[in-house]
Image (cartoon, grey):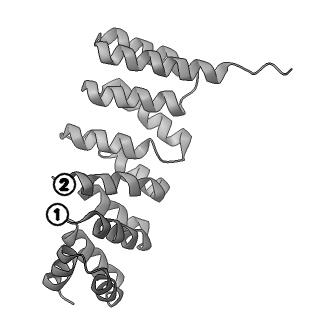
């Protein structure tokens, strides 16, 4: 199956033909075919299927393709990338950390969203803390604070309080207060009764 046929089957939603066509390809050919076709506007069920196919590839091959999707104009395509990248663990951490300083603020936000879902808590927390020190966009700062509130330690309270003082924005202040409550709750030890 050539790229044109695959694109046609993807656009028409013919999952049987997509599966049969992809099964005939070697890993490198499949990766390239997926990279190309995922740049198209596709139905959600096709995107989900193609995402599952990407996850069958070695993570070192699939993760860069998913990162490319963070630049897509299609919201569903970006969402698939954000959802799938965390399952790639340390490979995704390495690649996403390179995109935390992207010129495109949306890509930085998507990178933070994906990172915050990766279970490697220590590595992710260090990246989030470091990004909090350099990020300037309020919406990304808000998401960073929320993520640190979820995965951080009570010691992070001072870090996010300092940020709130540097950026006195009403929504940011709200997010800081919510995150502080969650972080402080982690330091409270339940009283056995």
Where, by quadrant of the figure, is residue 15 drawn? bottom left
What secondary structure is found at the residue carrying circle 2?
loop
Outermost residue to the left = 4
- Label ID, residue 74: 2
Which residue is nearer to you in this view: 160 or 133?
160
Where, by quadrant of the figure, is residue 11 drawn? bottom left
Which residue is nearer to you in this view: 74 or 69?
74
Which residue is nearer to you in this view: 30 or 60?
30
Which residue is nearer to you in this view: 50 or 104?
50
Q: CA distance from mark 2 to mark 1?
A: 7 Å
Note whether 134 is above or below 11 in the view shown: above
Q: Earlier in the sequence, mark 2 or mark 1?
A: 1
Note whether 178 is above or below 37 in the view shown: above
Task: Give the labeled residue for mark 1.
Answer: 41
> Could you tell me which quadrant the N terminus lies in?
bottom left
- The reply to whether residue 163 is in sight is no
Residue 28 image offset from top left, x and y in percent: 31, 79
- The reply to whether residue 43 is in sight is yes
Residue 132 image offset from top left, x and y in percent: 37, 27
Measuring 63% from the left and 24% from the top, which residue is drawn there? Answer: 186
Circles 2 and 1: CB atoms closer than 8 Å: yes
């Amino acid at each position: 199956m050539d790229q044109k046929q695959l694109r046609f089957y993807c656009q028409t939603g013919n999952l049987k033909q997509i599966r049969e066509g992809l099964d005939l390809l070697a890993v490198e050919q499949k990766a390239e075919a997926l990279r190309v076709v995922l740049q198209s506007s596709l139905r959600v069920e096709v995107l989900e299927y193609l995402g599952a196919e990407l996850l069958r590839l070695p993570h070192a091959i699939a993760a860069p393709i998913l990162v490319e999707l963070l630049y897509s104009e299609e919201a569903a395509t970006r969402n698939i990338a954000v959802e799938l990248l965390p399952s790639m663990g340390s490979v995704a951490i390495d690649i996403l950390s390179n995109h935390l300083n992207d010129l495109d603020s949306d890509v930085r936000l998507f990178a933070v969203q994906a990172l915050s879902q990766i279970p490697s808590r220590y590595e992710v927390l260090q990246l989030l803390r470091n990004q909090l020190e350099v990020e300037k966009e309020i919406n990304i700062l808000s998401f960073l604070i929320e993520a640190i509130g979820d995965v951080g330690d009570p010691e992070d309270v001072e870090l996010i309080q300092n940020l709130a003082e540097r950026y006195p924005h009403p929504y940011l202040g709200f997010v800081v207060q919510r995150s502080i409550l969650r972080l402080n709750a982690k330091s409270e030890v339940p009283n056995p009764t």
